[in-house]
Amino acid sequence: MSESESRHPEDSHSIDSQISPWLTPLTYFLVGRIAIPLYFKSIEVEGHERLPRDGAVIFAPTHRSRWDPILLGYLAGRRVTGRDLRFMTLLEQTRGIQGWFVRHLGGFPLDRDRPGTASIRYSVELLENEEMLVLFPEGHIFQDNEIHPIQPGVARIALQAIAKKPELKLSIVPVALRYNRQPPISWGSRVRIKVGDPISVDSEDLSAKKEATRRITSDLEEALKILYHGASYSGSE
């Protein structure tokens, strides 16, 4: 086996991800002005004022549909905050023609079956540079109306960034996206987006990382439960 064949897919080369200076604004425009208004019957947003305008940010949303990243860009991307979002996404979604678009819109790969370290390091670097990073803390798309156990990865990445740059201002923002129809989301669906209060991590005691990880993960899970169930639709909607 050659050296290149033995390497992990994430580590075989530097992560190829960037914000295209022309594709990203064009995509935001087309999605925000055409695709979303045509596809969804209504979009309700609560908590816009809680969106951070500076500092490092981890958006930690629920995950029920492939529309979720698109709606997050609509919620908090360049059109609203003047900043671009970076996404950790599955390795297979960064391949081929689709992958070219994903990587040039700020997506970067995670191999869920054979997780390496490159995506984690890259996430920490983005936060050190005070960018906005999207991590789906449930780990998968779940096609139901329950909040599934939150994985500790969000807290660990946040704490690593603080450890490398102690002066960093970093917050985790819980976001609930709820559709009035069960996935797959069909044309004419309604969606409610609720933005929670940012969870600050820059004051955590880094000498007790395990306890800090548990505390942040627990706080995030509780916040998502409150937001998600507070965005529920009645049977008549």
Image (tube, grey):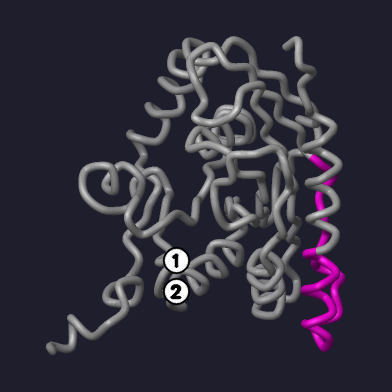
**Is residue 215 covered in magenta?**
yes
- Which residue is located at x 26 percent, y 47 percent? 100
Q: What's the magenta region? A: 196-217
- Which residue is located at x 61 percent, y 23 percent? 181
Answer whether labels 2 and 1 touch (C-beta < 8 Å): yes
Say above or below: 235 vs 122: above
Q: Horizontally, is 103 left or right of 2 in the view?
A: right
**Is residue 88 covered in magenta?**
no
The image quadrant that residue 155 belongs to is bottom right
Q: Horizontally, is 219 left or right of 115 in the view?
A: right
User: Residue 73, percent across and down?
Assistant: 54, 35
The image quadrant that residue 209 belongs to is bottom right
Residue 115 tag number: 2
User: Residue 25, percent across and down?
Assistant: 42, 30
Label 2 to label 1: alpha-carbon separation: 5 Å
The image quadrant that residue 2 belongs to is bottom left
The crowd level at tag 1 (other Cα within 10 Å; few <14, some 14-19, many 20+) is few
Q: Secondary structure at mark 2?
A: loop
Residue 112 tag number: 1
- Which residue is located at x 76 percent, y 56 percent? 171
The C terminus - image quarter: top right
Q: Nearer the viewer, residue 234 or 7?
A: 234
* Residue type, numbered disc 2: Pro
User: Residue 57, percent across and down?
Assistant: 67, 53
User: Residue 130, percent across and down?
Assistant: 62, 58
* Residue type, numbered disc 1: Arg
Say above or below: 49 vs 7: above
The N terminus - image quarter: bottom left
